[in-house]
Image (cartoon, grey):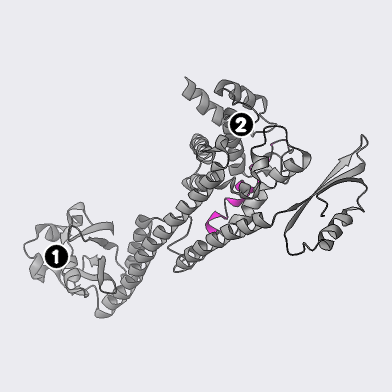
Amino acid sequence: GCPTLKVFNGCEQCVAIRKGIAINGLGKHCFRLTTSPIKDEHGKIVQVLELAEDVTDQVKAEQEIKRRLNVVTKELNFLSRLDRDFISLQELSLDQILKQCVEISQSLLDSKICNLRLFDGSQKTLISKASSGLEDELLKGLKVGDGICGKAAASKKPVLIMDLLEFKQLKDDSSVRKSGLRSAVCVPIMLKDELLGTLAVLSPQPNAFTNEEAKLLMCFANHVAILIDNLKAHKEIFTSYVNTIKSLVSAIEARDSYTRGHSEKVTKFSLDIADAMGLSEEHKAMLTYCGRLHDIGKIGISDAILNKPGPLTVAERAEIQLHPLRAVDILSSLKFLDKGMPAIRHHHERFDGRGYPDGLKGKDIPLLARILTCADSFDAMTSDRAYRPGMSMEKAVLEMKASREKQFDPEVTDAFIGILEGHRR
């Protein structure tokens, strides 16, 4: 008994549909109300088309997706709070973190010579991963028990050497004598009882370090151990999260055989454009995520609309145009995507301002969104759809040239066409 579709004059009767929903005892259901004004030749609203849909199941599905994403996000955010100076969700590089650890160790003990090694359990060897002020000869792999670092690793205790020339294990080591080093302090990097590596600071001066400084370096090494373990766990969770996202995107694309693989192709095209334009690694990393996730908002759109062989109605088109906003809503709690959200929201804007959802124009549209627009449109043009066959690459290139400065950013279009024409040759 609930009215689902009405065309009527004026706007007052919109209330009738809302009353109809309430009267029929459907208050516990979730409804989406889509209203489209119809104007006469003078621009005056003369009719309104209103569509009331029961979207309870869609809302529940979206809530479940958000719940699953939030669980992973909370874990990611918790781990990232361990040390903001070292780890950020945008930049997870073990090499960079270890390099920063070396720099801090140098500052702590006021020495420019430092070496951080990680333990390779399979080879029982300490491998140099970050260093400063040491020659290659002193960066070779060490067995546990050999040299200063090996001794610290074997004993799992700090080793303080006041004069390396008096250190028995190095008396016959010509490389150390040639280096001019005279004193050193080396501490194990331990997580509970597990050896992760060693951290050494050295000096050309004898008696350069004290017991207090050895304790200070040991405290810092404990922090480094947490950072290394944090990064390992962080990457495992992040990998699991990315795989979950890929599964969700694949589930969306599987509903429409015509768009299978669309997100991956859009991602590849976007990265090709980014390379041609000389964008940073950070921009390219964000494009990778945005390319894969830009259509996730379609999860709530019915198959009847997605696979419709004929033209869409006004209401159906309005439904499709909501998917960028739904994508932002679904992904809004993912802090590592903050810089990419504008690209996802605005990937259907047009350079001439006639796009959606916000009608942005020209360079007001975020750069990553302008890149996604080009990549997304090209794949759409060259792919078969339920309502039409795909264009040839040559025809799609002509279409993009014709839409330069209309739908597409000229700079982005030129870069992309250059790539496509280069491949064609």
Name the residue rendered at 48%, 68% in the picture.
Answer: 78
Location of residue 304 (image quadrant): top right
Q: Is residue 7 left or right of residue 356?
A: right
Amino acid, disc 1? Gly
State the SS at label 2. Answer: loop
Q: Which residues are magenta?
A: 335-352
Q: Is 355 placed left or right of 150 in the picture?
A: right
The answer to the question of whether label 2 and label 1 lie on touching residues, with beta carbons closer than 8 A, is: no
Q: In this view, which residue lies farthest toward the bottom?
A: 212
Residue sitting at x 38%, y 62% = 231
Q: Could you tell me the amino acid type at mark 2?
A: Arg
For the residue carrying disc 1, how many other residues have a C-alpha within 10 Å: few (<14), some (14-19), or many (20+)?
A: some
Is 348 inside the magenta-drawn segment? yes
Quarter of the N terminus within the rendering:
bottom right
**Of 56 and 45, the residue lying toward us:** 56
Residue matched to label 1: 147
How many marks overall?
2
According to the picture, the residue beneath numbered tag 2 turns out to be 385
